[in-house]
Image (spheres, grey):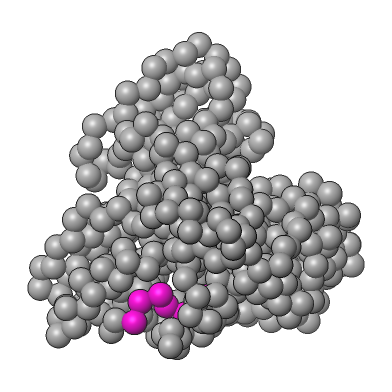
Amino acid sequence: MPLASEAWLDRYVGMNYYITDCEGVGGRVKERLEDFIVEEVLIDGQVVPTSITGKPLPKIVNKPGPWVWMIIEKRGIDAITLLLILSRKLGVNPRDISFGGLKDAVAVTSQIVSVRGVSINDVPSDFGRDVKVLSAVSMDRAFITSDIWGNEFTIRVRNIDISRMGSINCVLNQLMERGLPTYYGYQRFGLRRPNSHVIGKYIVLGEFDKAVDELLAHAYPMEPPRIREARELIARGDYSRALELIPRSYKYYPERAVLRQLVSNPRDFVNALRKLPHELLNLYVESYQSYLFNLALSERIGRGLPINRALPGDIVALLDEHGLPTKHVIHVNESMVDKVNELIVRGRAVPVGHLVGYNTRLLPGPQGDMELGVLRSEGVDPAMFMVKSIPKLSVRGGYRPLFIKPMIISVNLIGSELDMVFRLPRGNYATVLLRELIKSRQPEVDFT
């Protein structure tokens, strides 16, 4: 039987099972920011380094144009906050800023960020203590997701149980044999406030009052007393006093922006949400997509079905020369399943699940049937992802691989500290791999 998680947070975000059945080694991640280093890997294999690891800067040819590409190192800052900082400091619209992927907030991370409408002379060496600019070049286009292959992670896990050190190889071997599930990790939903998918669900359902209530009033155990007090005031409808309590920081920008609208118009929930950056609202809806994906993937693992092999009725995506999924998909039938699985073994194809959107069409087969069951249990259908009140939040849907093979670069155990360096393709989470190793019963503590 698959090993079920005992952590409430895992179940809350849809990660109900582990793919490995080895004993966990315990331990804590992110006791210090430097314990979790994330460096972008470009599509040509070059690494975008942090100042900590000392790797050389990537060679990027300067091209005249309206864009500036900056290599940015941030410490302890999430992507939306970074977007707001750059927008305000450079005086540009957030829509003129683009990057290839979101990076962990509680970490030291590096990535390329492109900004339109500024010159290199406008770019400072830093945007405050926690955001440094390591390099900048002029460019003729935006930096986008297809420019990156993935990320290289340099991780330290502290205080592991050294009596279980044999589990390290056990887990890594099983991951290579069975595949690492492509769950969306904790960062997608939040650790202290793991509710981005809940807000997204209410937006999809058109229940904007409940979306605002979840954003503002629902207090979670890991939050500071002052914030919990403010949320209690919001629940009683005292928006003005709550606004006085919530700090004026980027961290609480969403709450303050929505509250300001509610102070002037307490029932205008749709326009209150519209005060948030489109990127953040879109993230909520995509987080709900992610939750649905996690639930269906959990169901597949829970039934003992393989994630690294196609079954009749599955959908597989062909992979490009970099091992990344293309838009070419195949609906697998009985006659072709053996040939398709040969492609999977050779790294040329991968089974995929749906990221549900208004264009999603579920087909008969094990995966499609499980996805349909998840939608029914949630009380939603694909058409609801056409968000009529805020059309820009509508999502067409897509596919996501069910598994990946992590690229393990090094594993070193020094006393009770485990140091690892590994790479994952874009869109995948280091915490999903670490979760298999640690098997924490309280990830909201051990991963923050």
The percent position of residue 371, horizontal first and vertical second, equals 67, 70
- Horizontal side, residue 184 vs residue 368: left or right: left
Relative to 363, residue 169 above or below: below
Residue in the picture at 48% in, 67% down:
307
Residue in the picture at 38% in, 60% down:
430
- Horizontal side, residue 307 vs residue 158: left or right: right
Q: What stretch is highlighted in magenta?
A: 15-21
Residue in the picture at 71% in, 67% down:
364
Magenta-drawn stretch contains 290:
no
Magenta-drawn stretch contains 20:
yes
The quarter of the displayed image where residue 36 is located = bottom left
Residue in the picture at 40% in, 65% down:
180
Out of 218 and 228, give the one closest to the viewer.
218
The percent position of residue 14, horizontal first and vertical second, equals 57, 75
Out of 184 and 401, give the one closest to the viewer.
401
Quadrant of the snapshot with the C terminus: bottom left
Q: Going by the picture, which residue comes out furthest to the top?
A: 64
| Residue 82 visible in this rendered orientation of the protein | no
| Residue 342 visible in this rendered orientation of the protein | yes
Q: Which secondary structure class fits the magenta region best?
A: loop
Q: Going by the picture, which residue comes out furthest to the front?
A: 335
The quarter of the displayed image where residue 25 is located = bottom left
The quarter of the displayed image where residue 238 is located = bottom right
- Horizontal side, residue 190 vs residue 110: left or right: right
Q: Going by the picture, which residue comes out furthest to the left?
A: 415
Quadrant of the snapshot with the N terminus: bottom left
Out of 402 and 313, give the one closest to the viewer.
313
The percent position of residue 437, horizontal first and vertical second, equals 30, 74
The percent position of residue 231, horizontal first and vertical second, equals 67, 76
Q: How many labels does the image show?
A: 0
Relative to 207, residue 23 above or below: below
Relative to 229, residue 428 above or below: above
